Amino acid sequence: MYRLFFKRFFDFIAAFFGLLIFSPVLVILIILLSLVNKGTPFFFQRRPGKNNEIFTIIKFKTMTDEVDEAGELLPDFERMTKVGNFVRKYSLDEIPQLVSVLKGDMSLIGPRPLLVKYLPLYSKEELRRHEVKPGITGWAQVNGRNSISWPEKFSLDVYYVDNLSFVLDVKIFILTVAKVFKSEGINSSDSKTMTTFTGHNS
């Protein structure tokens, strides 16, 4: 019953009031990030959701679009702005995703939505992470986030799919809040983000 009805109900209520509560923070961050990112405070990208259906994710933009002489984007740590670093450190870049939760594309808790190009690289078991809606935070995020390997991350995602419950969601929510305040597990290195998944040799 929780998986089929109450999870969505709680998601909608939490996202609605979350956006109201964080609205002052949203306004301030939109202004600051607009200044450092030349008028573009948001980052939009297509991501696969439940049953591999594609949706557009929205996050605060924490990096510039600077490129090298060859026209390639500079490394993440070179493009990260000071404001963006603060926003990423305390996971404030995730707040706009509450809009996706409100729409029903995402859940508060679930496997993180990754890149569309990863879809053909998953094993049959790893692809099961898409049997539920993706989340703003999840079991993998509170068990290492960017500091664990891709196989470990996917294993934790599938564990969540198989054990989804109200109790597990509450546990993940509490652990997420604790990690945000401690700024734990945000980045594994100076690259600022998880390494690219290239298949089973990752």
Image (spheres, grey):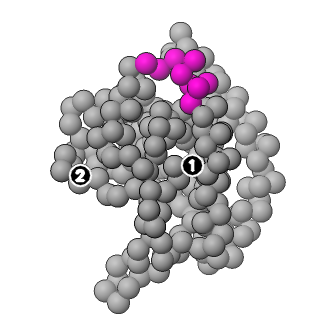
Q: Is residue 105 visible?
A: no
**Residue at horizontal 47 percent and vertical 80 percent from the top:** 66
Category of crowding for the residue at label 1, using alpha-carbon neighbours closer than 10 angstroms: few (below 14), some (14–19), many (at least 20): some
Q: In terms of secondary structure, what is the magenta stretch mainly?
A: helix
Quadrant of residue 32 within the rendered picture: bottom right
Name the element at disc 1: loop
- Residue occupied by mark 2: 202
8 left or right of 121? Answer: right
Quadrant of residue 80 within the rendered picture: bottom right
In the rendered image of this protein, does residue 25 appear above or below residue 132? below
User: Which residue of the protein is positioned furthest toward the bottom in this rendering?
Assistant: 69
- Residue occupied by mark 1: 184
Q: Nearer the viewer, residue 39 or 84?
A: 84
Residue numbers of the magenta segment? 163-172
Q: Is residue 187 visible?
A: yes
**Residue at horizontal 36 percent and vertical 51 percent from the top:** 115
Q: Is residue 66 magenta?
A: no
Name the element at disc 2: loop
